[in-house]
Structures are given as structure tokens and as C-alpha cells.
Image (spheres, grey):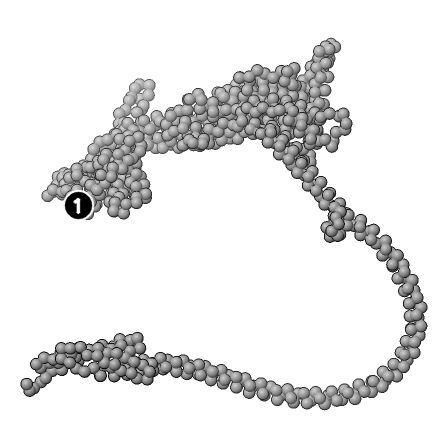
Amino acid sequence: MMTKSPIALIALASSATLAQQGPGDGNIPAPNLFDNQIQCTSRLPGMAPTPTLVATGDMESLLDTVIGMGDVRITDRDALDALGYVVPPEGSNCGQGRTRTAFMAATEGSVATDVAAGYSDVLPKFKVIYGDPGDAADTGTAGALRRAQLELDRAVANDASTATQLSTLRDALARAQETDTEARTEYNVIAQGPIYQAAAVEWMAKATVTQSVADYNTAVTEASQAQRLLDAMNYGGYVPLGNTGLTSSVVVVVNGMGTVNYAALGQYANSRGDRVAQANESGVWNTSVSNFDAAGNLVVPNRLNNGELEAITRASRLDALRTNLENHDIALTALKELQENNLNIVLQPIIDESVRRAQAERDHYNTQFQTALADDTNQNPFTVDNLSTPENEAAPYSIASRNAEYTSASNVRFTAETALRNAAAAREAATQNVLDQFNNPDSFLAQLVARREALKTTADTAVTDASARGGTPSMELTDAAVAAAEALVEAEGSQVTYQALVGDPENPIGDLITTLLKPDGDDGQALVDAIAQTYDRTKVNKESIEALTADTDSGAEADGPITANTKAIESLDGRVEQNEQDIGTLMGQTDANAGNIVANATNIAANSNNIVTNSNFISQNAGNIAHNSQLIDINAGHIALNSERIGANAAAIGINGGMIGENRRLIGGLRGQLDAIRSGVAASIALSRMPSIDGGISFGAGMYGGEAALAVGFALERKRTTFDFGVTSAGGDIGAGIGVGVKLWGH
């Protein structure tokens, strides 16, 4: 609940509009108005209840909770109140009349009293036309008019209707129309204004929710009844698998949740190869150990019948078939989640195989269930005959026909659920709009004006009616009409004052007022922000003025623009005097220039003769220029020829440069090879200089071309065979050699 301080609002109005007031004028009337609005709106809920939204920390919304699996009617009182909630009217503080005392003009102000009382007065008038928003059976005069029109339309379409019947129905329609028109006239007198109009939309939205709940509950009842009839039917062709380990030990299914048993995964996936379905000599399968053969194929239990294999069937109720399929869906989902999240690469092959097998089992049971649903065998072959209806044969029914009825009822239930969700969301938006209108000063003032116009109309009507009856209106009626007119003028004045306050977009008062009137607004912070903003702007203006008039001793560059301009103007006085002196001097120079002009005229005449002489010279030079042009063309040809030859020489030089570079590279390579050759020669010399000693080690050294080499060797002689081995090092490279000698004859 918010509590607003009138002092804060007075301070706001005083600081924000000081320039608009004269001495002794006092504060503008706006703060008192806002105090009354605060009394009205501070007791409203902070926000609309939102049963369609998930609250913080919850897993699902209130609406999701009450809907559940869609198989239970919505009857909980708290849930119904939350779904159909509106800002409560009924005679008080703009809303909660059930828990608080009504506003009294004497103690809490006529503004709050007028708006709140009007909000409460509108609802009964609304109910007369549209019915109680919380009662789906109450449709008001609008519903009665619709029903009267429908009955007449049916009668007109029925050829058996008599003239008397049609006349009676037309009279009933006329009375319904008159009653509805009167109700709407009374309603429209007091229902104008943004807040009351928003309230009407909210009540309409609540009525829609009320009807949607009723439709949803009916749809749930019919769908549940259709499912009970379907589930109770028996299907004789069901083929269950022989092993139930998937949903009993591999994945434990409890309350719709599946928990994987890791210890049973290996056996189910047959990781040891010893758990397989077996067949006897007749081909009859035994699947008690596993539902899969050695190759991992799903095996359906069979038996011999007259020498032929057939699947082993069992009669089962439809609800058992559905439960079995649902459990296999749960098991498959649990294994797939394990497959997706597994981090143990050793366990992954077993999980993958388990998922494959679970998918095969689930697909088998889904096929069985769909086959059962399609069974159109008549399960009610009996007939009932009697004298009154000799052909009263009992209606046949089958699993397929009852499944069709259940599917249709389920679709209706789903449609009803969607409509309920949409209606609840629309009601939430309508409720929030009412709260926004209450907290909007512009809307609140417009509503106050509309309410007081209605009060004035009512007071004026009472005076007029008294006069029409031939009497004199009482003083009480007359005073009430005058008071109503004065109250309307006061409301209109307050509205104009407010609009003037917020008319300047640069003035922060508009945002401040809005903040102060919010249920969760922060009065202190709002005032601090407004004062700080005003102070900042004043400070900036002061600094700007000081900067414009700054006067320093550091030169004109450091002065403010205004000061600099003033100094510049003062400095112009000396320049004006100097300019006057310069003008006098120029006038004397003008006289001198006149004499010079006469002398120049004489010189111009002499120059004319010189021009004629120069023209002759120019003609002679033109001939010389033509001759030189011919010589220039000849030289240009020679230059072009030389340019071609220079280009050819440049190309040849480029080729020669490339060849020279290549030769240098090859020479560099040969130099490196020459060093290696010298090292090799030195190594050969070192090896050749080693003496051969039987059973001993010998050494040698060699030098060639500046390269040196060392060698070490070993020799061994036998009666007819001699072995010689040597190793040398030269230039950083290692060389080795071995020799063998065999004596072919002699001793």
C-alpha cells in the first residue's frame, strides 16, 4: 500500500510552478486534487493477478495447475476467484468496498468520494443489462432480448406456428426491447469516463472467463465420460511381448516418471550374448528371457495351430493397453535422455542398443493399440422390441465408434481449454488497464469531470421533474443542483490546471506527478530527482552566464564573448580617428593622381608608335618560329628512333642481368661443392695413409686444398681372409669404408 505526503506534493507544485504565481497567490489547487486521488488509488492492488503467468520460483502457472491433465473440473474457490478477479467496486475507495469503509466527502474529500461512489454505482446498472459477471446463467436484459428474438425467429420459420403464437412472441420481443433500452439509458448516464469504461471492459472479460470455465467443465465431463466408456471395452486380439523387463526393471516407471536402472542395462542390451529369445523345433518362440533373438531382432511370441504359426493373443481392456503404451513411451524417453547426456564412452554402446530395442518395443505396442482402436466389431448385438416401438433396436457400438466419440469429445475439451486460457489472459489485461486508468492523473481527472456531469444531470433532472409535476422544486433539490454545477466547474478547472502543469515537455513535473501516484512510487527519490534536475539546469545556466561575461587579465582570448566584444568596441575608437586622418591623406593623393593621369596619356600616345614597330618584329619572329618548328619535327623523329633502340638495349641488359645472377648462383653452389670435394680428397688421403696392422688399430691424417681429415681403422687377418675397416672425418662430415680380401690359392 502506498502512502503519499501532501507536503511533498505542495513542495512539488511550489518549486515547479513558482514563476506562474504572484506574491501571496499561494499554491495552485493541484496538490489537493492529487491528495484525493492518492486516497482513492493507494488502496488499490499494486498489480492485477495473473493466473496465466508463471510466478517467480514456480514450475507452472496457477491456470496450468488447475487445468492439470485436463480431466478434472475447475471447482476450487480460490482458483475461480483468481481467474475471474476484477478491481472490486461496491461503494468505496475506488475499489475494495468489501474490506474498507466507504469514502465520505466530509472527511476524505469530494473527489475521492465522487469517483469511488460512481465506480460502485455503475456495476449494478451494468448487471441489469449484461448480468452478473460471476454468474454464467445471469444474462440480463441483453440476454432476455436475444432469447426473445431467437424464439420469434424459430416460430416464424415453423409453418405450424399460429398467428396468435406469433403475436404473443412479437409482444414479448417488444417488451424485452423496451426493458433493455431503458436499462441502457440509465447505464449510459453514469457510465461515461475512461475509468468506468475500462471497468465495463473488465466486467465483460470476467463474464467471458466465467462462461469459459462453465464450458470447460462441461467439456471435461463429457470427455471423461467418453474415455471411461472406451477404456472399459475389451480387445481380444492383443499380442503382448513375453518379457516385461523394460518397464519393470530396466526403467522403473512411477507416477509418470521413468528412472533408469544402470545394473539392468547390460542384460537388456545382451552385452554378454547369453540373453536371447529361443525357438523350439516347431519354431515356437520362448521370449521369457528376452524379446530379441541373437541378431537383435524383436521376436513376437508364436504358437503352433494346426501346423501353422500364429501370434499368441490375449483379451485386455483398453485402459490396460493405453497404460502399457504410455509406460513404454516413458521408458523410451528416459533412455533417450540418458543417451543424450551420457559422458561414459564405455557405457555408450550399451545405452545405444538399449534405446534401439526400447524403440522397437514401443513401436510394437503402439501398433497394437492403434489396431485395437480401429476394431469395429459390434459389441452390443442385442435388440429390444416392444409394442410401442417394434423396431427399437439397441444401438450397436464398437471400440472404433467409441474411440471416435472420445476423440471428438477430447477435441472439444482442448478447444474449451484454449478459449479459457485466452479469456483469462484478456481479463488480466483488462484488470491491469483499470489499475492504469486509476493511476493516470489525466484519466482520473477526465473521470472526475464525467462523474460530476452525471451528478449534475441527475440533480437537474430532479428539479425538472418536480416542476413538471406542477409543483415548486424544494430548496433541497435546488441547492443540490447548484452544488452539482459548482462541483463540475471545480473539476473542469482542476483538469485545465493539470493540463497546464504537464503541457511543457521540458518541465519534469509531469514525470514527477506520475511517479508520486504509482502504487510502488518512491516519493523521496522522485522529489530528489526533480530538485536535482532543476538545480543542475540552474547551475548550468549560471555557469553559462559567467562564462559569457568573464573578464580576465590574460587577453581577449581568455575573456567571455560578451566581455571580449565590449573591449573590442572600446578599442575601435582610436581606429576611427586614425581612419579619418587616413581619408584626408588619401584626398591629397587623389589630386596628385590627377596630374599623373595627364602624364600617362602622353606616354600612351608614345607607346602606340612603339606598338606598331613591335608588330613588324612579331611578323618577322613568326617566320622564324615556323622554320624552327620544321627542325623540331625532324629532331622528334630522331628522338623516337633513339627511344626504340634504348628500349631494346634495356631489354637485353635485363636478360643479361638475369643470366649473370643465375651464373653467380651456380658459382656459389660450385664453391660449396668444391669445399666438399676438397674435404673428400683429404679424407681419402687420411684413409690411404693408415698402415695395416693385423688385429690392431691404425690412424691416418690427410690435407688437401686447405681442408684436413683424420681417419682411424681396424684390420684383422686370418688364414685365407683379411678384413679392413676405417672411419674418417673431414669438413664436419663422417665417412666410412670396409674391405674384405680372400686368398683363392696358395697357402
Neighbor class of circle 1 (other Cα within 10 Å; few <14, some 14-19, many 20+) is few
Looking at the image, can residue 127 be seen? no
Q: Nearer the viewer, residue 632 or 95?
A: 632
Residue 200 figure quarter = top right
Residue 361, compared with residue 682, is above or below; it is above
Residue 29 figure quarter = top right
The residue located at (53%, 17%) in the rendering is 99
Q: Position of residue 35 (x, y in %)?
A: 64, 23
Residue 57, compared with residue 658, is above or below; it is above
Question: Which residue type carries mark 1?
Answer: Gly
> Which residue is labeled 1 in the image?
273
Q: Position of residue 575 (x, y in %)?
A: 85, 57
Q: Nearer the viewer, residue 421 or 149?
A: 421
> For numbered disc 1, what is the local secondary structure?
loop
Q: Nearer the viewer, residue 582 or 377?
A: 582
Residue 729, compared with residue 652, is above or below; it is above
The residue located at (30%, 19%) in the rendering is 386
The residue located at (31%, 77%) in the rendering is 731
User: On the picture, is 410 further left or further right than 95?
Assistant: left
Q: Position of residue 596 (x, y in %)?
A: 91, 73
The residue located at (44%, 22%) in the rendering is 78
Q: Position of residue 238 (x, y in %)?
A: 23, 35
Residue 583 figure quarter = bottom right
In which quadrant of the rendered image does the C terminus lie?
A: bottom left
